[in-house]
Amino acid sequence: MSLYVTELRRLAKRRLTRLLLVLLVLGLAGIATAFAFSSHKLSPAVVAEAQAKSDADYQRAVKDWERSVAECDAAAARGEKTEERYGPDCGRQWQPQPEMFDPKWNLPYQFDFRGEFGIFIAVFAGAVALFAFLVGASFVGAEWSTGGMMNLLLWRPKRLAVLGTKLAAVLTALLGVSVVLGALWTLAFWLIGTYRGSTAKVTSGVWQSTAISGVRALALVLVVGAVAFALASLGRHTAMALGAAVGVGVISEIGIRLAVTMAGVRFGERYVLSTYALAWFEKQWKLIDYRSCDFVQGQCNPKEMLVTWQDSALVLGLGSALVLVVAFWTMRRRDIS
């Protein structure tokens, strides 16, 4: 039996892998179920009810306005000053208009697959990326901490081939899980849109855009899994990957933000990793420098900077490649004992 198949089976039989997979499925199912109940199909009866409520609100506002004008006229006839209380001309210019009472404001929420599913692709990617990080880190981390890696290298002394095979097994498993769950996730929200929302204007172009977003999500999941695997291999323990993730998060999201703010760096968010993650999903992310506004003169024409998905691919790709290269280089040179 090949080492690759053996590693796939070992990964699939790990209790932690199965537990994390169950938690992932339950979490995604819970999100989809809760969201399904929050969305409502806008039937003609629901739309008519919203229109009737808007009409009633309009008529009520008109009656209140008429009463206010009449009170103002009566007060003016008694010689009282009315402008401060009722406004000029007793507020006649403030007569309510029908367009001020849009029936859409009284409609319940309805999920729109075309306009909103992209957000849920990002939610899916975040959940599966967390799963990928824990699986990738724990798989190789447990091998080092329990001595399994050393025993395996006695049987297969080719260090880089062994580590590469383990990485390939992890990425294959993550690819399979992501594709299957991604298809089910898309189907779930398509059904929500069909029966409790709207699937209007979903064209072939929309499906192509959805597919591209799905590929981006898949790439992020694989990168996170590979980086977690490399970090745990470097530290010979799962905790190394977890500690590195926390450290990078604190440094990037808190330390760098505070540093660039205190230093007055223009567009300081371009040094924060989350900016590139957002740009990766949104195709581009706009940074705004509000300090270029002249609030004294009441003018605000802030300068802008765009971070594109190509920038994200470069930053995240180079960072991931660097971690992997260091992990394999260390594997080749370290003392296995």
Image (cartoon, rainbow, N blue to C red):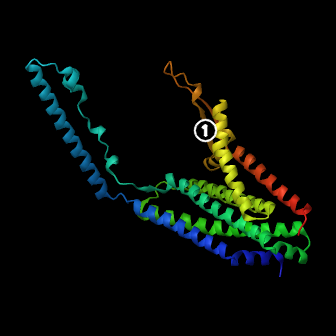
> Image quarter for residue 275?
top right
Residue 23 position, x and y percent, is 57, 70
Q: Nearer the viewer, residue 236 or 276?
A: 236
Position of residue 112 relative to residue 60, above or below, is below
Residue 11 position, x and y percent, is 72, 74
Placement of the N terminus among the 4 image quadrants: bottom right
Mark 1 lies on residue: 286
Query: Residue, x 61% and y 56% (percent of image)?
Result: 208
Placement of the C terminus among the 4 image quadrants: bottom right
> Image quarter for residue 293?
top right
Residue 185 position, x and y percent, is 55, 65
Query: Is residue 265 visible from the viewing direction of this image?
Result: no
Q: How many marks?
A: 1
Kindly identify the amino acid type of the residue bearing the numbered disc 1.
Answer: Lys
Q: Work out which residue is located at the far bottom of the displayed protein and give it.
A: 1
Position of residue 81 relative to residue 59, above or below, is above
Residue 211 position, x and y percent, is 62, 58
Query: Residue, x 67% and y 31% (percent of image)?
Result: 263
Residue 272 lies left or right of residue 205; in this view the side is right
Looking at the rendered structure, the secondary structure element under dot 1 is strand
Residue 297 lies left or right of residue 59; in this view the side is right
Query: Dot 1: few (<14), some (14–19), or many (≥20) neighbours within 10 Å?
Result: some
